[in-house]
Amino acid sequence: MVAEIIVPARVCLYGDHQDYLGLPVIAATINRYIRLESTPADMNIIQIDMPDINKSVSFRLDEEELKGEARYFIAGLRVARRYGWNLRKGYRIRLSGNIPVNAGLSSSSAVMVAWIRFLAEASEGVTNFTTDLLAKMAYEAEVLEFDSPGGLMDQYAISLGGVLAIDPLRASYERLNDPGGILVVGDSGISKETLNMLGEKRKLVTSAIDRVAEADPSFDIKKVKSEAIGEYRSLLKKKEIPLFEAAVRNHSITRQAREILRGEEPDIVSLGRLMYEHHTILRDLVGVSVPEIDNMIEASMKAGACGAKIVGSGGGGCMVALLPEENKEKVIRAIDACNPREVFEAKITGANTGFHESR
């Protein structure tokens, strides 16, 4: 008997480089997927085959140390054990999918969510399993186990599905409406440097926020308005100023987008304007874009997109454009003319993390 789990990709619409500051983000799951197929095995061993990247890893069920290429999966198993889950027998697992790898669409988080979802089904001692718990455990396994600088947007968005405003400080979320129109994604083919990029930017902006808070105990990054940024410049080091300004302005953009997406018929023109403004801040102040992505974004805007932005931590990866249906072919052709690795229409989808026995 082969059992299957399907997990979607996620795209961050607003709030990149915000969740590790405890600031809200808006993300959506799209119709690109990781598929996990599992078959019980006689041995006390987990064998994981990943044909898309020509890799296979294996480990014994009694392994605890995070080492080697299997450490990612061992981390998930360690978290499951802390919750009282016990995987008693071995499995042969095949992981495949069509989410671009290392491109800002959270292929690695989709793998972790699929792995934790599999453990929920295959382990003993699992009670009261929910998608909220799935999100929490995936975050613990992928971020806390490795002391990573990332936030929890990826794991929560993928586990819960749809369009979500996620508050990382409270680990809470609000379901929002579909923005309407369509999304088109362009993959630059340039691999990201996620951990280095996040670690460097997080260190600088956290230092800036701490410096301001020390000088002004009433300071709250969530309440600062964009027009007040100038009041704090003299307190900051030169490298901190653009990142501090970016944090304040991007938080304002995310709040505005959230209000629009609460409406029954969101205005994609306004959403697109905010999306492009968000990109210019990520490009000019945070410094995480690259010319190849900027070219795709500008081409999409000239071809009729309402807005576009880089996706994820930056330094490479993908861009996403929001546009009306009638401009789809023109925008796809315009992005394709920039020679991306891939360009495709993306549809917002649900979490689809159920467990299916296929044969």
Image (cartoon, helix red, strand yellow):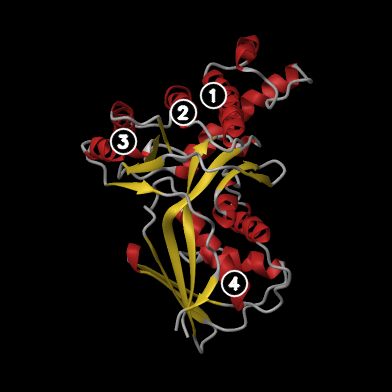
Decide which of tag 2 and tag 3 comes sooner along the chain.
2
The mark closer to the camera, 2 or 3, is: 3
Q: Does residue 317 appear anywhere in the picture? A: no
Q: Earlier in the sequence, mark 4 or mark 3?
A: 4
| Quarter location, residue 124 | bottom right
Q: Position of residue 93 (x, y in %)?
A: 45, 75
Does the residue at mark 1 contact the one at mark 2 (Cβ under 8 Å)? yes
* 178 vs 56, nearest the viewer: 178
> Which class describes the residues within 10 Å of circle 3: few (<14), some (14-19), or many (20+)?
some
Which residue is tagged 3? Answer: 327
Q: Amino acid at mark 4?
A: Leu
- Of the two numbered discs 2 and 4 on the same chain, state the one appearing first in sequence: 4
Q: CA distance from mark 2 to mark 4?
A: 37 Å
Residue 103's disc number: none
User: Residue at position x 58%, y 77% from top?
Assistant: 61
Earlier sequence position, callout 1 versus callout 4? 4
User: Which secondary structure, mark 1?
Assistant: helix
Please name the amino acid that badge 1 sits on: Ala
Query: In the rendered image of this protein, does residue 148 appear above or below residue 119?
Result: above
Secondary structure at badge 3 equals helix
How far is the residue under mark 4 from the one under mark 3? 43 Å
> What's the residue type where badge 2 is placed?
Leu
Q: Residue beneath label 4, please?
A: 119
Q: Which residue is mark 1?
A: 246
Residue, disc 2: 282
216 or 341, nearer to the observer: 341
